Amino acid sequence: MLKIYNTLTKKKESFVPIDENNVRYYSCGPTVYNNIHIGNARAFVCADLLAKVLRGIYKKVTFVSNITDIDDKIIEASAEEKISIKELSKRYFEQYKRDTKFLGIDDPDNQPFATDFIKEMIDFINVLIDKDAAYVANGNVLFRVKSFKNYGVLSDRIIQEQDSGSRVDVETYKEDPNDFTLWKPSTNDEPGWDSPWGLGRPGWHLECSVMSEIVLGVPFDIHGGGNDLKFPHHDNEIAQTCAYHSNESAESFAKYWFHNGFLNLDNEKMSKSLGNVVYIDDLKKNFKGNEIRLALLSSHYRQPIPWSLELLEQSKNIYQKLNREFKKYNLKELKFYKDSKVGKALLDDLNTPLAIREMQRLVSSNDSYLEENISTFKYIFEGSDQDLSIDKKLSNEIEKLIEERNNARNNNDYEKADKIRDKLSKMNVKINDVNGKTEWEIL
RNA sequence: GGCUGAGUGGCAGAGUGGUUAUGCAGCGGACUGCAACUCCGUUAACAUCGGUUCGAUUCCGUUCUCAGCCUCCA
């Protein structure tokens, strides 16, 4: 039985699916206007972690994660890069795919694009207007926050006590400063779609309500995303979907809410607007995908990760050490064993640090269930598509050098032997003399 | 100001009402031509002040500090 912390109730709860034959999970995906950074990647790794665990224990899981391909940031970026919005979002969507695969993130079962659901969004807005939950003002359609009694349930906000507008000017056409945009007008040089309210485009929060409704149906089991999406994004989604169904309970939308903590650099949230970002490409040179993934999972998903080079080096060491042991086992297929020690740690609110610790302990213990633990561990922690197979030509060359070195050693020509070792080391090859044999690996 | 979360050894990080994980790093040793790998040993921690208790790092409360959200954000 999986236990999971539910942000809505603020308690760790036993996970009971609505339909055991199809667990449905929606997680907010990226806005494709820029490369994802390691902080974004953490959120996707956490979402993937939950999806993998669910897949490990249920027959069928439908995991949906959207792609936001229309948004003001995208419009700005396309103007800056002087390419069309379509080209831009395609470029960064592909980059996102590469980066996530590199980090061992599985594809979602369904990855809807916002722009494929414009008509459905318009229909959705019309229902909200009919129900008096939305109104037209100044060419915009706005959600009437006052119409939803439970507004702010997820983040526990009493809306009157918020400092609304303290950092932003409130648009004068809003009935209430907290009302948010469902549809906004586009100028002729901005992307837009015809609608009953003129040429325009959807507000950001709308797509998740509409696409989860269509692709998964409500209520579904789990809705997730980064901590910063709790408010306003997820509270707005709740307001929209609940108003659409005339149901006040957030659980009528999604039963469990799953949020991951941040990745910090110098004790500060990593974010594009702060400019303290590290991109995946920056790390590829020195670290393997699985090493980075391990670093991202070395903290519990709800805790902040203090990101640093030191953390990466540690993770690299741990990964390499574990893999030296794993090599001794020939596992046919990777499976999630829920009764293994690693599995149990993960079933307890995805306790990855505990799972790593269990794995480290087991590796030196000769436990009879070692294979099940290794299988579970590799299934969760090692999914990078990075090609680790080594070119035949290169491996022949390495083996030849090692033979040469061993010949030198047998002739007590240690100077020559050490020279060859230096040469190998420059080729990024590490060698270990074990029991008369020389093992090697590429770092 | 409102809401949320967190403070554990050099670093990362679980966990526990009493026996003080684990890994990395450090130190000592075995092995080795030397390294490396592996193994053995070892140093070191639970923010503060109170309370409950026979006993608290663990429970309750105070204080302090830090981070996130209240604007786009993973």
Image: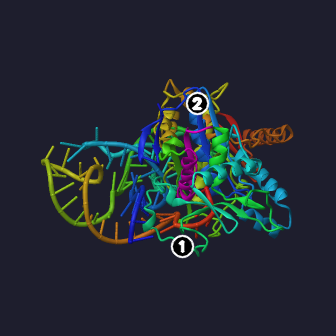
Classify 10 Å Cα crowding around label 2: few (below 14), some (14-19), many (20 and above): some
- Residue depicted at 81% across the width and 53% down the height: A90
- Name the foreground residue: A195 vs A350: A195
Quadrant hosting residue A74: bottom right
Could you tell me what secondary structure mostly forms the magenta stretch?
A: helix
Which of the labelled discs sits on residue A97, or is there none? none
- Name the foreground residue: A224 vs A327: A224
A209, above or below A176, in the image: above
Which of the labelled discs sits on residue A165, or is there none? 1
Regarding mark 2 in the picture, which secondary structure is present there? helix
A320, above or below A277, in the image: above
Residue A234 image point, x, y percent? 55, 53
- Under mark 2, the amino acid is Gly
- Foreground mark, 1 or 2, reads 1
- Residue depicted at 86% across the width and 64% down the height: A83
A351, above or below A92, in the image: above
Q: Is residue A222 magenta?
A: yes
- Under mark 1, the amino acid is Gly
Q: Which residues are magenta?
A: A217-245
